Image: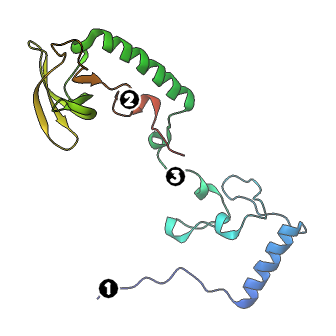
Amino acid sequence: MASTAAPTHVTESISDRKKQRELAEARQSGTAAPEVDVKTGSIINPHNPEFITKRPWYLGGNDAGPSLDHQADQRALSDRIELSLSSADRLVREQRINQKSISKSGFSAIKTNMWVEALKRNKKPYLMCRVIKIDKKRQELDVEYEDGKIEKNIRWKSKNKSHTPRVRLIKTGSRSEAIDHSTVGKETYD
């Protein structure tokens, strides 16, 4: 038989609620002193509603009094590091320089698991695909498209110079270059 713990919530009487309501109205009008944060000792704006200043029951912990610390970002420091606009601009500049050097070096810059654009069965449009095998001697690639199809022995450069290239490097986008999130932070969308 399981034992049940005694409830920690105590029901307030009507007179207690009336006193709390009158005190809140007095604080908002300025006749009573505002509440003080029990953790930091700073004054809490009397116009903040109770659901902001009171710690919710589902966060656990004891409710020692009014505080705003539960409103702070609760994520770990490693998750709070974000990609700033200046570091994003720096990454874009580095990526453009890197892409120029890669396009000059050509086939030697391609590595396995790198994302490129290729013509599927030599028909437009260019589709995203991942390099799964490289034959450096014959300059041929095996690629896997996003739909799972694998195409083998794709030549890096076509024999006829007038044709469009069968494979080209990705110039922009999230797959164009791997970003080290440990140094620059995570990208946010807010």
Residue at the (82%, 79%) spot, across then down: 22
Question: Residue 189, percent across and down?
Answer: 50, 44
- Mark 1 is surrounded, within 10 Å at the Cα level, by few (under 14), some (14 to 19) or many (20 or more) other residues, namely few
Q: From the viewer's perspective, is residue 33 above or below residue 17?
A: above
- The residue that disc 2 covers is 180
Q: Quadrant of the N terminus?
A: bottom left
Is 157 or 24 nearer to us in this picture? 157
Is 118 or 74 nearer to us in this picture? 118
User: Is mark 1 in CB contact (under 8 Å) with mark 2?
Assistant: no
Q: Earlier in the sequence, mark 3 or mark 2?
A: 3
- For marks 1 and 2, give the one nearer the viewer: 2
- For marks 1 and 3, give the one nearer the viewer: 3
Question: Residue 106, percent across and down?
Answer: 26, 12
Q: CA distance from mark 1 to mark 3?
A: 34 Å
125 to the left or right of 93: left
Question: Residue 51, percent across and down?
Answer: 64, 69
Q: Earlier in the sequence, mark 1 or mark 3?
A: 1
Can residue 183 be seen from the camera position used here?
Answer: yes
Q: From the viewer's perspective, is residue 41 above or below residue 174?
A: below
Give the amino acid at mark 3. Answer: Gln
Residue at the (22%, 11%) spot, across then down: 161
- Mark 2 is surrounded, within 10 Å at the Cα level, by few (under 14), some (14 to 19) or many (20 or more) other residues, namely few
174 to the left or right of 156: right
66 to the left or right of 189: right
Find numbered disc 2 in the image and state the secondary structure of the residue it sits on: loop
Q: CA distance from mark 3 to mark 2?
A: 24 Å
Dot label at residue 147: none
Give the amino acid at mark 2. Answer: Asp
- The residue that disc 1 covers is 2
